[in-house]
Image (spheres, rainbow, N blue to C red):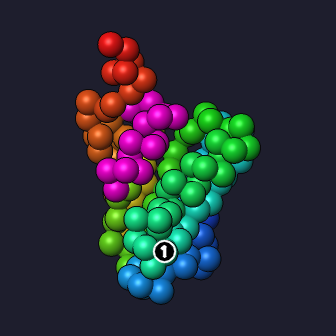
Amino acid sequence: MDTDDLLAAARDATAAAHVPYSEYKVGAALDTASGAVYRGCNIENANYSNSLHAEEVAVGKAVSAGDTDFQRLAVTSSQRDAVTPCGMCRQTLAEFAADDLTILCDSGDDTAGVVTYTLGELLPDTITASNLDA
């Protein structure tokens, strides 16, 4: 999937966001090696700690489908403010993806408005399963 299409998929995902408290819609689209794209949106809960983030919803859909070879992730918000995955979502991504996973953050109306990071840039010195060996 090209960058424009992946970004469009993330933007489309914001339409399903349930955000009665923050009114801040987030959408994510996770591109996998199989060619499948998994979309996620944020789902807020009155007990804020039970809210789901768009990235973790997309990861959950991919993993539950047995599709764990992640290629790229596009993230957007209704504000087009180049939102990045939060620390919790970064750690969730690190469970399944390498440091070189490309993350596209939407800051405009076209691909010129995309800020690109790798997961390793956003989350250096990641906690991994190897850290648990003691």
Q: Picture quarter containing residue 119?
A: top left
- Whole-percent x and y of residue 32? 63, 42
Q: Picture quarter containing residue 34?
A: top right
Compared to 90, does 120 lie above or below?
Answer: above
Q: Nearer the viewer, residue 92 or 47?
A: 47
Q: Picture quarter containing residue 64?
A: top right
Q: Residues within 10 Å of mark 1 (few under 14, many from 20)?
A: many
Give the secondary structure at mark 1: loop
Q: Is residue 51 magenta?
A: no
Residue picked out by circle 1: 44
Compared to 115, does 32 lie above or below?
Answer: above
Q: Amino acid at mark 1?
A: Glu
Q: Residue at x 32, y 50 (%)?
A: 87
- Residue at the front extreme? 47
Q: Is residue 33 left or right of residue 52?
A: right
Q: Nearer the viewer, residue 83 or 132?
A: 132
Q: Residue at x 37, y 14 (%)?
A: 133
- Whole-percent x and y of residue 5? 61, 61
Compared to 76, does 130 lie above or below?
Answer: above
> Quarter holding the C terminus?
top left
Q: Residue at x 43, y 36 (%)?
A: 94
Q: Nearer the viewer, residue 91 or 101?
A: 91
Q: Is residue 116 left or right of residue 71?
A: left
Q: Is residue 95 magenta?
A: yes
Range drawn in magenta: 86-100
- Whole-percent x and y of residue 69? 61, 34
